[in-house]
Amino acid sequence: MKFIKNLSELTKNSHKIRKDVLGILEYALGEAMPESAIKEAVKLEEDLLKVADKEFSLSHIKNIFVIGGGKATYIMARALYDIIGEKITEGAITTNESSKEDIGPIEVIAAGHPIPTEEGVKGTKRILSIAEKAKEDDLIIVLVSGGGSALLAAPSFGISLSDLQTTNELLLASGASIKEINTIRKHISRIKGGRLSQVAYPARLTALIVSDVVGDDLSVISSGPTVGDGTSYEDAYNVLKRYNLTERIPSSVLSVVKNGMDGQIPETPYPGDRVLSKTFNRIILSSSAALESARRKAEELGYNTFILSSEIEGKAEEVGASHARIAEEVFSSGVPVKTPAVILSGGESVVTLDAIGKEEGGPNQECVMGFAYKMNFLNKAAFLSVDSDGIDGYSGFAGGIIGGNNKEIDGDKIKEALKKHSSSNFLREIGGGIETGKTGTNVNDIRILGVVK
């Protein structure tokens, strides 16, 4: 399967380093597909069903339900059905994949991302209804991947879809980290922050998770629908205050948060809560695995490699600039790795917008522009940054690449584009926007830096 749709355009009149960096990305995306991870995690041997580290005798299970949400859940559900198809009683998943058919008894509901939609609300209601009717002798397999925070939309009573949409838009534009954003999402939802497990109890529940967050924090991935929540309504309120949102978010949302602080609304289930005692969570795919795959490919191509971290966060422009400084040190002194070198990193960068939807762009694109603005020898280095799900911010690109060719980069144009958050237009002009479309996976951002002499 080929992911980069405009590869020939991106590599036209380019040096080998640029072509190799793109080839490494192509390989890493192929190795990060959730289908293989599901087939590794789930085995059916006669009467014995193995799901991750758990074993279930089918003679002791009345029904198997499959539910979940996220960008990768369609591929996950399809792979699961290939293994245990006729054993599944009923199911429903929400995903951002449109025009997808149901998978046997698993209903596939196309919903909106990154802003929740009416379809997502209806789909999540269906998911909750399945979880609610499950009994103690039933097994629920929950499929979770990045994007579930928007795709699993069940606003707290009193919050309209419109208010939820406005809140998500404000949060995504605020510059808050995904952990901070999800602290609020969990406290204005009827499914997040362990509440799905609460609804399903006392049924047995096993969640198979594709991680798209820094540090693989289970409580943050898709806002942790099956994970105990260590945050509180007070924490949610403090996030709103920190980013000056208390006066801007809808009154219904602020009311829920304040009522929760006053004890009028129950907190999300805490870690160790009884309603989580029948829940087992297992990460089956993460950013670290994608970076290791990229490392193997780079070494196969003859490069010395170094993985900086899979947990790099920060303002997109600054993350890119830090990679430029690393490239200069590699070039001049061979630290932390000698040339020819490939340096890899993952994590999640952010962009703070003055106005939502003002321009077309995304954090990965601003990341490579921040790199170019600080870089002095772009013909000897190539740097790319992509969102592994194929959609970077509000744009048609997965991310961008700069360097590894002889194109002149106008620093003033970069500065102006960063100021306006119009990264897509800039990269389109220089042939640096990476197009993949929806990849079917979601393991956070992937950054690849190549340096030669």
Image (spheres, rainbow, N blue to C red):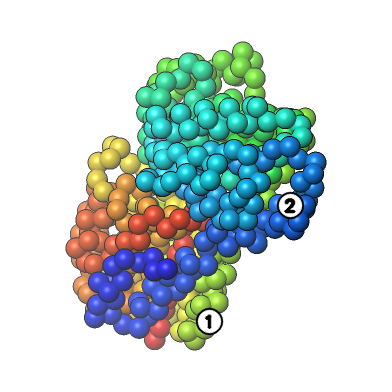
Residue 410 position, x and y percent, is 20, 66
Residue 102 versus residue 325 in the image, above or below = above
The 10 Å Cα crowd at callout 2, few under 14, some 14 to 19, many 20 or more, is some
Q: Amino acid at mark 1?
A: Glu
Q: Are marks 2 and 1 in contact (CB under 8 Å)?
A: no
> SS at mark 2?
strand
Q: Amino acid at mark 2?
A: Leu
User: Which quadrant is the N terminus positioned in?
Assistant: bottom left
Residue 373 visible in the displayed image: no
Residue 87 position, x and y percent, is 66, 46
Residue 262 versus residue 81 in the image, above or below = above
Q: Which residue is mark 2?
A: 49
Residue 370 position, x and y percent, is 34, 60
246 with respect to 229 (left or right): left
Residue 117 visible in the displayed image: yes
Q: Which residue is mark 1?
A: 299
Disc marking residue 173: none
